[in-house]
Image (spheres, helix red, strand yellow):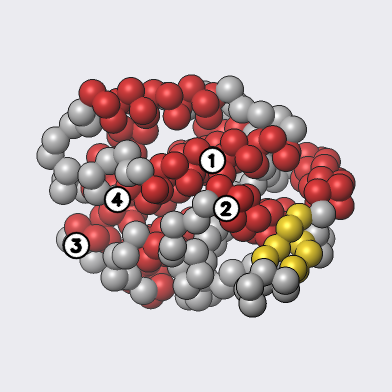
Amino acid sequence: MRRRFDTPPVDSSSLHRDGNNGGRSRSTVDWAAFLRRMERKKRLVGRSTNHAPPADYFGRATYSSFRLEGLDVNQQEVWESLGGGNGRPMLRSRQAQRMRNHAAILHHIEGDLRSGLPLRTEGVVRWYTGISAGLSTTGLDQAAEVRLGDVVRRINSPQMRIRAALREIAGTHAQLIADPLVPAFNGILARLLLRYHLGRCGLPAIIFDPEVDGKVRPVEEVVLRMVELLDGSFDALLGRGK
């Protein structure tokens, strides 16, 4: 078994690098090429009988999301927290329980997406309760509940054209990161919502790299990053069928 959560390679052939930007490298998307490739990959994935993400996705996504939140975890701890068998401790730390709850939520999300179920506000509140593992003892205030309801409605009425969908998904995610919805574990909750939003638009899960994706990004940069990551996610799904 692998104990390392390796990041799939990224196909950046749809990105153009612009060096004339004050010494910084700025990327733009060749949308025509990218959209053709995404539509082709979506059709190929749609022909497969196995639409579930790779088995190591749940551990990789948990490790990445917790690290992005600034929590001190390592890959071995995530592996042991999510693992089964006689070797696992009967009593777990609160952090280990949060990681197990997070992976369980991801499994539940994938099942709901395959069944075509809409997202529910009360379900998102349960996610928050699960990842806080008892740390959060207060409910969401009225303003947060209104915002959450708006996000849920947006996710449940997805854009199906890929370019428009990516813009909407990136805008929602960037807003949730820049303006926290909940007092703790906001980034983790935002990335769970991101997965549901992608899935409702017929797109696979993506996993951010905690070493490079830790800063708050404007919407356009989030779109570019999602373009990079989606290629790798589709390739991982298609590679299992070879």
In the image, residue 111 sits, relative to residue 208, either above or below, namely above
In-image side of 113 versus 138 (left or right) = right
Helix, strand or loop at mark 3: loop
Specify few, some or many for label 4: CA neighbours under 10 Å numbering under 14, 14-19, or 20 or more. some
Q: Which residue is mark 3?
A: 93
Q: Residue 92 at x, y = what percent?
A: 21, 61
Specify few, some or many for label 3: CA neighbours under 10 Å numbering under 14, 14-19, or 20 or more. few
Q: In 3D space, how far apart are the residues under numbered discs 1 and 4 (Cα atoms)?
A: 19 Å
Q: Which residue is mark 2?
A: 222
Residue at point 73%, 38% (across, down) = 162
Q: Are marks 1 and 3 in contact (CB under 8 Å)?
A: no
In-image side of 23 versus 146 (left or right) = right
Q: Quadrant of the C terminus?
A: bottom right
Sequence order check, earlier mark of 1 and 3: 3
Sequence order check, earlier mark of 2 and 4: 4
Residue at point 27%, 41% (across, down) = 182
Q: Which residue is mark 1?
A: 171
Sequence order check, earlier mark of 3 and 2: 3
In-image side of 73 versus 94 (left or right) = right
In-image side of 195 versus 84 (left or right) = right
Q: Amino acid at mark 2?
A: Val
Residue nearest the observer in this picture, 220 or 187: 220
Q: Residue 61 at x, y = what percent?
A: 48, 58
Residue at point 71%, 30% (across, down) = 160
